[in-house]
Amino acid sequence: MKKTLAAVAVLGAFAGSALAADVQIYGIVDTGVGYNHVDADGLGQDKDSFEMKSGQASGSRFGFKGTEDLGNGLTVGFILEDGILSDTGVDDKVMFNRESSLFIEGGFGKFAMGRIGSLNNGQSSWAKVGMINAFGTSDWGGYSAQVGSIMATAGQWDNMIAYQTPDFAGFKVYAQYSMGNQVDGTDDDYNDAKCGEENESTSDRYYALGVTYNNGPLAGYFAIDSKNYASVTTKGGDKVFKDVDDSLTVTLGGSYDFEVVKIYLGAQYFDEAKLSSLGGIVGKSPYTNGNFSTANLKATGYSVTIGADAPLAGGKLMAAAAYVDGEQSDFEKDYGEGKYDFTRWVISAGYDYPLSERTNVYGVMSYMDDEIEGTGDNKGTDWNPSAYTFMVGMRHKF
């Protein structure tokens, strides 16, 4: 109720200020139905489901954005964007969870502050990694060959500072730094530990540097980013010092449009990345035993993907395949002499058909195969879960 009243208040404020600046209300409503079959192979529970889902092709959302011309080539603007579930009407716990940013831009480029998505993310105006994959960063049923199922992504970050250079012959350079997520004392990624102060070792922080290239049919992307994990937390009022290594990802890819077909290629090296950040079966159906969970395992490895889309019968045919290979990071420090190796194969095919400029229908089918193999002390503890999905839906933009 409080969030509803807050939204009404925001609407009223924007209505009153619309004459003073260029303010827009925008959004996407994306709803579909799908069938999923998961053969967990002991990694959680086998499951067959037929259900309605929101945000399969694009996350359902509504938002406000506006700009004001300051003169002398300067523009100030804002983006306030909230993710919603169109099948239930529920939104996230955090209002404007997708983005809440204030920016200024001019001949020097663009400078922004606030809650902003990482470059290796799909839910922000700053997200760029989707350009290297035919299915982008959307869910497409949960077990598809989209970026979030094959590469370690970094999500949104609070207290972010971001900079984008002007366009130099098709090149743009990006830099991001977050002073810390969840600095209000809420739970972090480490069991019941609490986060601490902004821009201190008690909070997770984030760094990124990236480059995009767009020139005619050729597009390219390169980024290096790191999660600087909190090394001090509190439990029961006591400080706990953790020996943790920061994550690192190096992502490279691009596309080339031959007009009759557009080809996508992408690759990533990841280190100290949680398997949960790769989504898929491990993220959705983790094996848990006491304090141990496969979803919390940190892995070092790589992923590669190839895909294509092509115009067909007034719509667009899409296909992609990917492979992920990794092993548990720092296993001797965390789990004695045993560790786990992880591999994933995934393939997807789909079709998207526009009913108008703002409305389209789509369908996608995917197959995913994971393998987690224990070695050393964990030898013999193996899982080979798999999943397939069929889903159709409709998306409307306003």
Image (cartoon, rainbow, N blue to C red):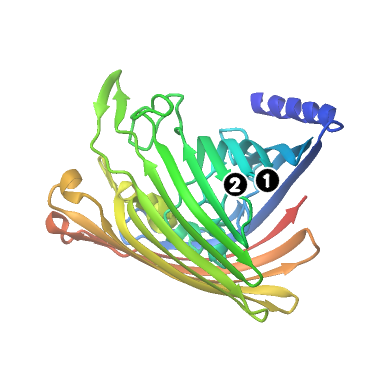
Q: Total label count? A: 2
* Helix, strand or loop for disc 2: loop
User: Mark 1 — residue?
Assistant: 107
Is residue 297 left or right of 64 when viewed as pictured? left
Amino acid type, callout 1: Gly
Name, please, the residue furthest toward the top. Answer: 237
For the residues labelled 1 and 2, the Cα–Cα distance comes to 23 Å
**Could you tell me which quadrant the N terminus lies in?**
top right
Coordinates of residue 209 in the picture (x, y in percent)? 47, 50
Give the label, 1 or 2, closer to the camera. Answer: 1
Against 7, residue 29 (above or below) is: below
Q: Quadrant of residue 6?
A: top right
The answer to whether residue 136 shows anywhere in this view is no
Amino acid type, callout 2: Ser
The answer to whether residue 392 shows anywhere in this view is yes
Against 265, residue 62 (above or below) is: above
Along the viewing direction, whichever of 107 and 396 lies nearer the viewer: 107
Q: Which mark is residue 134?
A: none
Against 198, residue 294 (above or below) is: below
Q: Quadrant of residue 311?
A: bottom right
Q: Nearer the N terminus, badge 1 or badge 2? A: 1
Is residue 232 left or right of 362 when viewed as pictured? left
User: Mark 2 — residue?
Assistant: 124
Q: Residues within 10 Å of mark 1 (few under 14, many from 20)?
A: few
* Helix, strand or loop for disc 1: loop
Q: Residue at x 43, y 61 (%)?
A: 38
Q: Residue at x 20, y 55 (%)?
A: 339
Q: Residue at x 83, y 33 (%)?
A: 18
Coordinates of residue 79 in the picture (x, y in percent)? 67, 39
Coordinates of residue 246 in the picture (x, y in percent)? 32, 44
Coordinates of residue 299 in the picture (x, y in percent)? 30, 54
